[in-house]
Amino acid sequence: MKITVKTHDEAIAVAKTMLEGQLFMKDNERSERAGYPIYTTEKNDEWVSDLGSRLEVNQGAESMNIWIDPHKGIMEYQLADALEVIDNCIYKIDDNISTELTRTTGIGQARTLLYGAYKEIRDILDAKFPESNLYAKYNLAEA
């Protein structure tokens, strides 16, 4: 069974459930030796290793990973829809609003933020859909 959550806090909550609500505290000595945070419980054979993109919950001889994926549930078609809206907005700004008005109002900042959203969507595509045709369709190589 693969467990995937969106945030670190959600992963901690799942780990607490797996450890039956036991409190765990950072073990500084073990953390320093390992090079990543390790949290122990009152039971000697239970601990949680925080490996950044996942938590590893160890109970005796068993271990379970809780993967952290902030883009869990995002589908490629949703990214395509978002890119289409962003693209339309940028073209409407460029085609319908004077350069002077864009420069002297928040419209220019909005356009800059829209280009930033392109980059963020490209980053999600890189992580989840690296073979997507959206790169070419929306010229995301330059985003």
Image: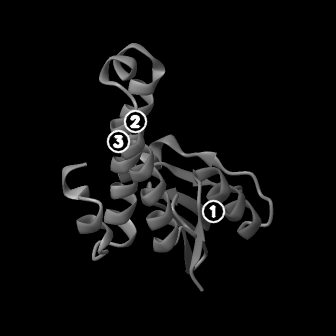
Three-letter code, disc 2: Asn
Instruction: Give the residue pinned by disc 1.
Output: 44
Residue 107 screen position, x and y as percent:
44, 26
> Mark 1–mark 3 contact, CB under 8 Å?
no
Residue 125 screen position, x and y as percent:
36, 64
Check the image and name the residue furthest to the bottom: 1
Three-letter code, disc 1: Asn
Q: Is residue 93 visible?
A: yes
Quadrant hosting residue 40 = bottom right
* Vertical comparison of 89 with 104: above or below: below
Instruction: Give the residue pinned by disc 3.
Output: 115
Say which element carries label 2.
helix
- Mark 1: give few (<14), some (14-19) or many (20+) Cα within 10 Å: few
- Gap between marks 1 and 3 measured at Cα: 51 Å
Q: Is residue 93 left or right of residue 75?
A: left
Point 28% across, 67% down: residue: 137
Instruction: Give the residue pinned by disc 2.
Output: 96
- Gap between marks 2 and 1 measured at Cα: 67 Å
Give the mark nearest the N terminus, 2 or 3: 2
